[in-house]
Amino acid sequence: MRSRSGWLVPAAIVAAAFAVRLIMLLQTRNLPIYYQPLLDAGFFHQWAEFKRSVTWGEAAPAFREPAYAYFVALVYTVFRESLSILRVIQCLLGSASVLLLYAATRKIYGRLAATVAAVVLALFSPAIFFSSEINETTLAVFLVIASAYALTRAGKGLPFFNASLSGLLAGAAFLTRFVSVVALPAWILHLLLSREPRLRKATLMLLVGFAIVPLCYHVLLLKTDQRAYFPLRTSWHALIGSGTTGGVTLEPEFEISLGGSRGAYRATASTNRIEGRRDMLRFAIIESPEIESETDAYRHWGDRAAEDLASDPAGYFGVFLKKLGVFWGPANPPSNLDMRYVADFSFLLKNRLFSFAVVAALGLLGLVAGVRRTSLGFALYALCLPLVASVYLVSDIEKMLIVPFLAMFAGVAFAAIAKSIRRRKTMKAIGLVVAGIVLIAVFHQLPGRELDRARNLVVAGDAYADAGIFDRAERLYGEAIGLSPGLADASISMAALYAGAGKSSQALEVLDRAILKSKDPQLRVQRAELLLMAGKPEEAMAGLRSLEKSYPYETRLHQLMGHVLLGTDAVEEAAVELQKELDYVGRGFITLSLMGDAAFRLGDYQHAASSLEEALAINPYSVPAASRLADTYSKTGQYPRACDVLGRILTVDPGNIPLRFKLGVCLYRADRPTDALMHFKELLKFDPTNADIALNMGTAYAAMDSVEKAIEMWEHALAIDPENEIARDNLRAARE
């Protein structure tokens, strides 16, 4: 009877945990993002669909860890492809994590500490939020806690089996969130420092269990002749710059030194994973042209990172400390738009009973006050995870991986205070309370998430701007600038809002103020674009030339320079600048289109055609690019290809009269006068006073040996335009 009653409290906590998660689902079920997963959620949803329907037994490289996609695919296969079912299952996983945390804590520290730990995790608002998010966090947290629970079971019986199970779960967590690999050395040390010989011997089984899941995935990769691509958050350039917060840099981009055959420069490298991969290879080739593969590039930057660290160890240690401070900062994970947006519809996400700063402070207090040999691995994990995460990026999801163990030791702190009071050790209890308050105050003074909050405001402002609610967008942009004056995105969005409303002077003022606060070159690029739109190409070009001296590889810099030069008919110089953009940044649609135009005007029709074909492969619906490509084909006598291009683009813009006229001329030159005549007849109905249409109709009739109708149309053209020499000459020749 006693054992049954002993589980009433955890059962109630787990039931409450599941209930609040379901309540949040009900409160947010009418939101668009509930049924339309965006960004990471959309990626995992689509990846899972692909796995389930196409490649269940295969693997392919991806920029995210793969295990969660397999989990989603499994849910879709066993049940059905339902986002609601997936969210409910994740609510069950989140509730199971609460139960496992209670069980693990109780085995080591007793019922009171376990109850507090379980309540903290059950009511921690980000844990509630992530239970409904299509995101790997809930699964990763569950696997790490399950691995920890199996580790506690190893000391009670079946050490080899439980150690193997713990390793297996840790390996699955590793493929769900790479940073959870920290559990492996922590668990190993936990077993090696145990007093029991059989636990020390179980270390090998832990290692074997951990290796199984990654090894199976690697076998699948080899089977499909692929290799894993690890996210760039673990690449060299995350060590360069001033640190990161929430997946974004404390500065807009990392600045790195470059030197090579083109001279020595400072360049910027994006922290976006896809763009960062491109930057990594592109900059490596600029420094060392002999590099032929990504493997060579990784090796190159590994050597460079080591050199940079050796050159300024104190500076990089300062960066590390800053990122470590951000990790322990007061902001709750997650600090993203989804959390802000969903919190407006669920009071549960506004719960501030256990903020991260409170949980972290009490967790460290409990860790110092009550660590035991039986919880040594969990203490090592709680201390080492922030260190490892801060070497590269500081992300909200990685914060969630430590919350359960901080909750465990927070329970220990509560239990220590209660025990001191019960034993009438008043001074000790007061000391623990005071220490807890001091720690909470210290954690609240650590770096916050101003930049993240500012970015979220910009994203929300962009959404309102897209919806046409410009006053609210302006207010949000203003708040973002107030929070983080150096954030370029906020000022650029505000300037774009003013420019769209015809307030170009206010837009320039916004950018000028931002330039005083930030070195982000995109501000200067945006300013030059506004000057170009305002009809001041010389002033725009002067700003771009000065920017080129410091940031020759900046995105859109040479593209905009080429645009300005094309507008002033400096076509050769424009082609040079556009080629730099293609070399330094990559092959974007606008740059390729401008290059095609420049090559066409220089008479290099082969280059023009290849550039425009690439541009249309990126954006097949561009009417100007398709029209210029048709002109290029016509110049080289490839009239059938020109007709095909024009025919395709007219399906996008069927009412484009000049394009239809151009297609009629092209059909005539492609020896298809009947088709050409059909187009001209339709055009003449629309515009019966157009002499050029009548003239070309006459030419088409003449090609079909309908001389009388040709003469009639040429006479009609002359009646419209008596000065039309071509029509007069055609009439004279026909009558003779």
Image (tube, rainbow, N blue to C red):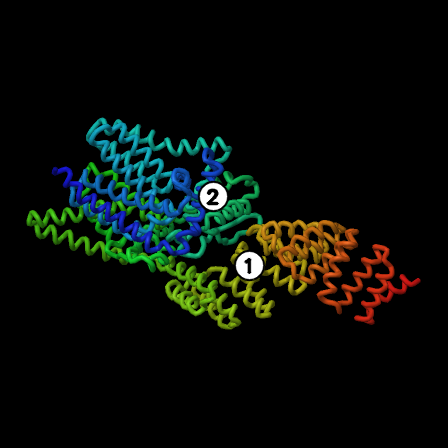
How far apart marks 2 and 1 lie (CA) works out to 24 Å
Kindly tell me whether residue 576 is visible in this rendering. Answer: no
- Pointer 2: what residue? 301
Badge 2 or badge 1: first in the primary sequence: 2
Residue situated furthest right in the rendering? 736
| Residue 534 coordinates in the image, percent (x, y) | 57, 70
Q: Secondary structure at mark 2?
A: helix
Kindly tell me whether residue 434 is visible in this rendering. Answer: yes
| Residue 469 coordinates in the image, percent (x, y) | 45, 67
| Residue 680 coordinates in the image, percent (x, y) | 75, 60
Q: Residue 518 vs residue 26: left or right? A: right
Which residue: 46% across, 48% down?
Answer: 273
Quarter of the image containing the C terminus? bottom right
Q: Secondary structure at mark 1?
A: helix
Which residue: 75% across, 69% down?
Answer: 689
Is 460 above or below relative to 164?
below
Which residue: 28% across, 36% down?
Answer: 187
Q: Residue 306 vs residue 367: left or right? A: right
Callout 1, which amino acid?
A: Glu
- Pointer 1: what residue? 548
- Density class for disc 2 (Cα within 10 Å; few <14, some 14-19, many ≥20) is some
- Density class for disc 1 (Cα within 10 Å; few <14, some 14-19, many ≥20) is some
User: Residue 718 falls in which quadrant of the image?
Assistant: bottom right
Residue situated furthest left in the rendering? 424
Q: Residue 231 vs residue 203: left or right? A: right
Quarter of the image containing the N terminus? top left
Is 582 above or below relative to 512?
above
| Residue 727 coordinates in the image, percent (x, y) | 84, 65
Q: Nearer the viewer, residue 298 or 88?
A: 88
